[in-house]
Structures are given as structure tokens and as C-alpha cells.
């Protein structure tokens, strides 16, 4: 990710030329797409996270999604989230990052279902063993 104002003129030209080549390859107007791509590179990308917490109190998992992972985990541990308020402390055991919020929400719903749980059992078996999580 490139922060605004960090491209010197030579880097900007290289970036624009690369965007023009890509636009030509895709059969689009090169000048419009090059400027548009440059503006997009200056904007910070917001990521959306799907996360799994493990409760030390009851040994169960909590699956959720958020655009701000650090703040959300703090809210869980400070008792601001009703679903985990009485299950504290909770520890972050896994997360995934997505560019689009709907993708993150879709993944969250999948992981909460039966097939999603089965996938997690295989994917996180070493992590689950370490935290002594039993998925029965």
C-alpha cells in the first residue's frame, strides 16, 4: 500500500506507465484508468476481518467479523460485547482479512455453520490442541 504523497515524480511516472500497460491489456482507456489507479493507490485500504476467539472461562469459541480487529478484541475483553461478556477472558486464536465487508460476513456465516466448523477442525488442529479446545 502506498501512502499519499510518498510517490516521487519518477515513481509516479512508472506507476502511471504500468497502469497504462494494464489498461491496454484489458482493452480500456489508458489515460482514464491510469489516473484512476493512481488515486486509488493513495487511499488507505480498509480491511475487514473474520476472527475466532477462545474463552478461557468456558473453553468455547466465538466467531465474529469487524473492520477493526484490535479494537473489537479489546471490546470483547472489556465486557462491551454481550455474547462474550460472561465468558471473559477471551484470546484471539485465528483471523482472516478481506477487502470487502460482504466477503468477510459471508465467511463468518460459513464458519459458524457445520461445514465451516469441520473445516476449522482440520485447518486449526494444531492451534486447537495447544489451547486444549475440544470440538465435540
Image: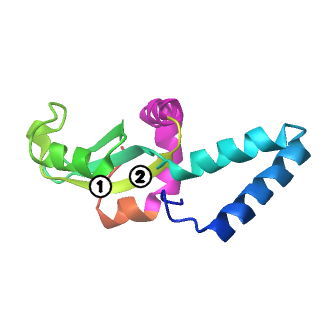
The residue at which mark 2 appears reads as: 95
Residue at the image position 33 percent from the left and 51 percent from the top: 134
Give the side of residue 103 with respect to residue 64, left or right: right
- Vertical position of residue 22 compared to residue 85: above or below: below
Label 2, secondary structure: give it: strand
Residue at the image position 44 percent from the left and 44 percent from the top: 46
Residue at far front of view: 9
**In which quadrant of the rendered view does residue 9 lie?**
bottom right
Label 1, secondary structure: give it: strand
Label 1 neighbour load within 10 Å: few <14, some 14-19, many 20+ = some
Give the side of residue 60 with respect to residue 4, left or right: left
The residue at which mark 1 appears reads as: 92
**Quadrant assignment for the C terminus:** top left
Residue 55 screen position, x and y as percent: 20, 49
Residue 98 screen position, x and y as percent: 51, 44
Residue 94 lies in the magenta stretch: no
Q: Are marks 2 and 1 in contact (CB under 8 Å)?
A: yes
What residue span does the magenta drawing correspond to? 101-125
Residue nearest the observer in this picture, 23 or 100: 23
Residue nearest the observer in this picture, 130 or 22: 22
Residue at the image position 50 percent from the left and 38 percent from the top: 116
- Vertical position of residue 128 compared to residue 10: above or below: above
Amino acid at each position: 500500500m502506498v501512502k499519499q504523497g510518498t510517490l516521487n515524480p519518477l515513481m509516479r511516472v512508472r506507476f502511471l506507465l504500468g497502469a497504462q500497460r494494464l489498461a491496454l491489456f484489458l482493452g480500456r482507456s489508458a489515460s482514464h484508468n491510469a489516473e484512476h489507479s493512481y488515486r486509488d493507490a493513495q487511499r488507505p485500504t480498509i480491511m475487514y476481518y473474520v476472527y475466532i476467539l477462545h474463552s478461557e472461562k468456558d473453553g468455547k469459541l466465538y466467531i465474529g467479523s469487524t473492520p477493526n480487529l484490535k479494537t473489537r478484541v479489546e471490546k470483547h475483553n472489556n465486557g462491551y460485547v454481550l455474547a462474550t461478556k460472561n465468558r471473559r477472558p477471551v484470546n484471539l486464536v485465528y483471523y482472516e482479512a478481506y477487502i470487502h465487508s460482504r466477503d468477510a460476513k459471508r465467511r463468518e456465516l460459513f464458519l459458524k455453520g457445520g461445514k465451516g466448523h469441520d473445516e476449522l477442525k482440520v485447518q486449526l488442529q494444531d492451534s486447537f490442541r495447544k489451547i486444549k479446545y475440544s470440538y465435540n
